[in-house]
Image (cartoon, rainbow, N blue to C red):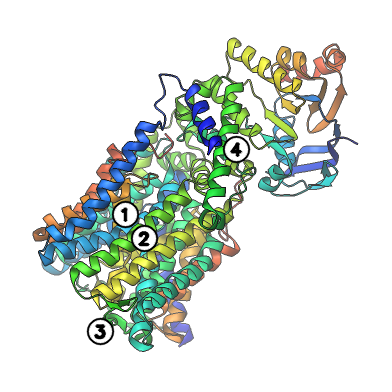
Amino acid sequence: MLYEVLMIGVMVGAIYTLITIGYSMVYGVLKLMNFAHGDVYIFGTLMTYTLLAKNQWHPALAILLAAVAGGLLAALVEIVAYRRLRAAQHRMISMITALGAAYVIQNLSELRWGNQVLPFPSLFPSKQLMVMGHAVSLTHLVTLVIAVGVIAVFNIFLKRHKMGKAILCVSEDISTSSLMGIPINRTMSTVYFLGGVLGVIGGVLYSSSYGAVSLGMGFRGTVIAFTAAVIGGIGSLGGAMIGGMILGISENIISVYVSSTFRDPITFLILIAILLIKPTGIMGKVEQGKV
Amino acid sequence: MGLLETRNLVKSFGGVMAINDITLDLEEGDILGVIGPNGSGKSTFINLLTGIYRPDQGAIRFGGHDITGLPAHQVTRRGIARTFQNLRVFSNVSVLVNILIGQHTQIQNRLYHLFLTPLAARKREKAAEKKALGLLKMANLADRRDELAKSLPYGEQRLLEICRALASNPRLLMLDEPCAGMNPNEMDTLADFIRELRAKGHTILIIEHNMPFIMSLADRIVVLDAGRKFKDGPPEQIQNDPEVQDIYLGKEDDI
Amino acid sequence: MPEGTVHEAEVHAVLSARSKPRSNGTIKKKVVGLSAALVIALVLPQVVTNTYWLGLLNFLIIYSILCLSLNLILGFTGLLSLGHAAFYGIGAYTTAILMTRYHVGFLPAMLASAMLALVFSLFLGIPASKVRGDYFTLLTIAFGEIFRLIAQAWIGFTGGAMGIVGIPIPKVFGMPIRTETQFYYLGLILLAITFVCLTIIVQSRIGRALIAIREDELAAKSMGINTPWYIIMAFTIGSFFAAVAGSFLAVYQTTVTPSNFRLEESCLMIIMVIVGGMGNLWAPLAGVLIMTLATEMFRSLAEYRMLIIGGIMMLVLLFRPQGIFGSSAFKD
């Protein structure tokens, strides 16, 4: 039993990592709480739902199209809503704008898909495998493998690709990067785009393994992403992974052994505790502001 | 006994010694100038004295009391006020309100006073406003009392910041590079203003890059280099000290 | 009072033609405006007799109390709290439970509600005052969600998703409050008390300390302001009055359900404050009026509600961040 719970926890953790990466990178660079993040990935997931369940597309094609659409939507939000406010405004203003953007996207999705829970088709065959004497669901295993694979590819992209390096540079120091000739606007749009793409992939994997998707999961996703980013330490891939894993595993243990009703309240309590004990996150460094 | 005494003050950031074993005395009524090349620890020093940073080692005594490690707001309450290197006036409120905020420690109104003894509270507010106007008059800012602080020209914002610090009725005023970014005219106004403060008996610690400015004002100069107290003496002596010239020139060669 | 007159004369002496100070003229204008508003507010239910409009007025009053109190946190102190609805909810639930189960009178129940909200806001405010701005926001989100989830899940105590129904008719000093008009006057008194209290606070040294924190927290500390203490103060005072509004909502609606206190509700309050203008005592009231009328006008477009709210939020902040009636609340 515990083994299975842990297995599902790790899978959910990997999915949360995907959802957190985009969020954490944006937050690390701009210190902007992107409230629209969850609604973007739910938009992509709902789109995948339509393509799969209604239009009978091939899953890979459906996910690809939805992921690109989600990425473009995220980039659009950045260009329309956030770019103008990037200059030294009071931070709160861009946060509230992000909240407004979240509502707009959420409402648009609601007009198309409604806000009820929709049955999401399972992407992988529901077989049981025997691994080291334990029954493992194939769905969970494949989901985990895909999630980890995407994270690995993304990591290579960051380290090797020119744009990936630019992103790392910008997240280190935005004004120096600009002086070094890195196109800030294009890099930022790319960060949002990739964050959206990864988020949609995470959302589709999540919905496929739970067999459901609903609009309400969007805001929850935003909070999960922020919580995971804070727990692990903001702005780093490793931090997103640690945070995502801790959340995924603890959530599953709580819903199985305590009560699924109190899963979210307890998650929030964990968050509050972490903020109080170590506000910089487990992997985070202490920032010393210049006076 | 000096008004301010530091004993073997040490502060490091991530292994780099920003302040290394500084012992210093400041007498009441003196104007002390602190100079030194970039990165010599001047700003860290002022931040230690005002409670923005905590020292790793050493002690700070002010007016005979130990203030080592006190948080910034309590240091201000004990009578140390400061300005900032990168100008930090409250830009979206009026000039007058800036001064009134500076008087925070001087106005005794607490929440219950406002509701239980409203008349007395009102009276204290009025008195504070009167005092604030007095300060603004001294800096020739009285006729701009209702303008937003950010609408003032740069030099006047600097003056406003000094007035705001004075509003807390400090026994020691610390100015962190007050002429940074000023034009020569504004600098003259500032120098006159500081002389006026000295005439009134204020004790002032000034960090400054501009040599002619600081040499003409200070009674005593302390030179910091790489976090250490390098020299300490009257302006004439420091000005003619070949070693002091060396550390400045040496630093410039490196660049 | 001779002292006062000397002072007035001095003030006038130093005024140049350039500055437009709070001269006697503007003070008079303010007094005239305030009394005119008061007279209109008092006479309104005699003119408006339609129950629908009276109901709308009562909700206007509730949101006015909420937004005035939120403005202390959001506009003056510069903290984005997304948990205001939770304190509104704590007020409503406490009053509902005390009045239905323990037959406590309305005024004691309201006072208890506000005090309970104050205690909870201390629980949240003490840690929240120690973390950076956005963590504060996250804490308030977490708190709001915990409150709502508990209200939904703890069926035995809060009635779960169905909420609490049949809250008795409130009596104020022995007088039962039944009709829309009576509720209107009760609400108006609560609003007036809130307004006066907040005005007194905002115009004092305390209000200035809050503004200093919003403008520059480090500089505020250097002015001798104990910033965590004042952040807690703004937060608890704001929550106290939010609970008063919740208490009024409970007896006015005679039911409370968790859906009254969703995150969306906190966002609606924020947008009302922003549309009016932050950091100014009066401006949020204009925001309340505009947003309530707008949502009522677009009632037939209920499915676009969030689109409209979100759209206005973005447009206002992108093109007029100081709000429609605000002067300049933020750094640029």
Residue C177 in the image, given as x and y percentages of width and height? 25, 75
The kind of residue tagged 1 is Ala
Task: Read off the residue under disc 3.
Answer: C166
Chain under label 2? A
Question: Given contact means CB atoms under 8 Å apart, are the residues at marks 1 and 2 in contact?
Answer: yes
Classify B220 as above or below C175. Answer: above
Task: Read off the residue under disc 4.
Answer: B102
Classify C131 as above or below C207. Answer: below
Viewer-side label of 1, 3:
3
> How far apart in space, not on screen, are marks 3 and 4 (Cα)?
53 Å
In which quadrant of the rendered view does residue C248 lie?
bottom left
The answer to which of marks 1 and 2 sits earlier in the sequence is 1
Marks 3 & 4 on one chain: no
Chain under label 3? C
The kind of residue tagged 2 is Thr
Q: Is residue A12 left or right of residue A63?
A: right
Q: Is residue A166 left or right of residue A84?
A: right
Task: Read off the residue under disc 1.
Answer: A36
Numbered tag placed on residue A222 in the rendering? 2
Q: Residues within 10 Å of mark 4 (few under 14, many from 20)?
A: many
Question: Given contact means CB atoms under 8 Å apart, are the residues at marks 3 and 4 in contact?
Answer: no
Count of numbered circles in the view: 4
Residue at 22%, 72% (x, y): give it. A120
Residue C150 in the image, given as x and y percentages of width and height? 39, 78
